[in-house]
Image: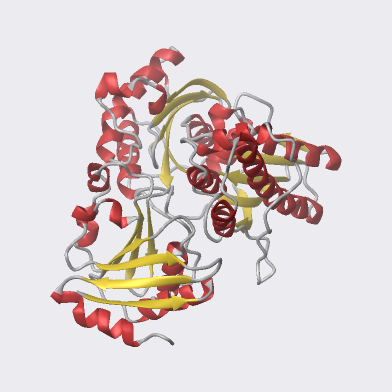
Amino acid sequence: MNSLVLGIESSCDETAVAVVRNATQVLANEVSSQVDTHRRYGGVVPEVASRQHLESLPFLVEAAFQKAGVGYGDLTGIAVTAAPGLIGALLVGLSAAKGLAFRLDLPLAAVHHIEAHLYAAQLDTEPIVFPALGLVVSGGHTEIYDIQDWGKYRLLASTRDDAAGEAFDKVAKLMGLGYPGGPMIEKLAKLSPDKKSHFTRARMSDGTQDFSFSGLKTAVSLELQKNPVQNETDQRNLAAKFQNTVLLEIGSRVQNALEAGTYKSLIVGGGVACNQALRDHLGKMTGSFGIDLRVPPPKYCSDNAAMIAGLGAYQLSQGKRADLSTTAIPRAAFY
Amino acid sequence: MVTSSFLCETPEQTFQLGEAIGKSAQAGEVWCLTGGLGAGKTQFVKGMAKGLDYEAPVTSPTFSLQNIYPARLPLYHFDWYRLNKPEEVEGLGWSEWLSKDGVVVVEWGDKFPQLLPSYAIHMLFDTVSDQGRRLIIQGKDEQNKSRVQEIILCWPL
């Protein structure tokens, strides 16, 4: 069974198009922020306006076909992000995908963006061994899932307020660092010898495993007021203290979930999964449990369409098709 | 202009003030929340959502830019923190959301004051201690004068 699926992603900032063979082999993975938008079509970042997704999309489809060395006639299916995201932005990708599916008479897969972030761990590599524990950490999401197989999920924990990636960006802003904040903090923290000290941990009054990062942001803000950063050493140590706390918050919940289940793999997805300190921290943990750590390379961690095409191709192979009346949903669960 | 301030000594009290306002909120209301990082804006919106009988989690829309909660009245939760130009707000269909039958609340709304309607109610979040916040309410329009007065009278609970 050979499949060749075109994937379209337009749920938030990025417009992206990819071509994936047999649900795992990525032939092309084009993202709008990687091309020279200013020169080619005067784009604005962040790409919030539906109009900008609309302007980028045809160029990206063209570029993806060129890179993959295929054309419309070679495709066996179309996959698109249908949820969650900005309604206007989602609708651009969804409408384009429906148009292509209708015109080319191909099956359509409507994919959930967060489920696709988990599926990304299977791109260009070996299949995941289930059952797996799934962690999604990004600018907008921080969640832990029990995954018995693709399509069989249970939400174990999620954030009550800010996402982990948002905490990185906002703390970087408080510290007067540039954007994006994640890589800046990671770089500074790496230069600090302090791998232990941390801020007060969030405690859920109802005893759940849910995350909360809003209090951490406030704690850093208060710390800066009480002890202003005087020099580079202070800055590095504060970055380290913050990052150590995030690693502890995420690590302890993953550890608890791994202890409570019988998992064979830990899947990590989302932009914050690019953070090497987090990868190392989780790597030690999976090592001690004797299970696989599956974190995709950075290009499949941040928003991309390869994960959409991959998951869409998998769903189509399972007979899960979306019809042309499918609509975009700003907030939806896939579990 | 009608103005007053509320002293919320804990995040729970900030939530409770939001809840009281959500309970009496009416369709078409627009709220502009102003305050630094960690000042309690999202905490206040969580309370508003609860007051509007919305039980599911309310999370920060900084990354998603807009969250929609199907509450007693739809609650449209915006965050302009990441946006740099008024055109980007317009690109989100801003004027359309204003004309819907729901409650609009914008964090970092002061970034583009020109986009806010004159009848918007302003809430300023001032950090007075680790946990304590002073919330200052401002109604600048005849249209929202009685609504702001009603809220001022509801506190302390």
Residue A220: give x, y in percent of width and height: 58, 52
Q: Residue at x 32, y 81 (%)?
A: B24
Foreground pick, A164 / B84: B84
Residue occupying image coordinates x 38% and y 27%: A32
Q: Residue furthest front?
A: A230
- Say which residue appears at 34% left-offset and 72% top-offset: B136
Position in image of residue A233 (x %, y %): 65, 36
Where residue A272 sits: x, y (%)?
58, 39
Residue closer to the observer: A143 or A99 = A143
Asked if residue B13 shows in the view, the reply is: yes
Closer to us: A234 or B19: A234
- Position of residue A110 in the picture relative to residue A273 (left or right): left
A158 vs A89: above or below: below
Q: Is residue A296 left or right of residue A89?
A: right
Please indicate whether residue A236 sits to the left or right of residue A180 in the image: right
The x, y position of residue A256, in whole percent, is 77, 55
Res. A15 image quadrant: top left
The C terminus of chain A lies in which quarter of the figure?
bottom right
- Residue A129 in sight from this viewpoint: no
Eyeballing the image, is B75 above or below A327? below
As drawn, B25 above or below A76: below
Q: Kindly indicate the quadrant of the structure image that contains residue B51.
A: bottom left
| Residue name at image x 72 percent, y 48 percent | A251
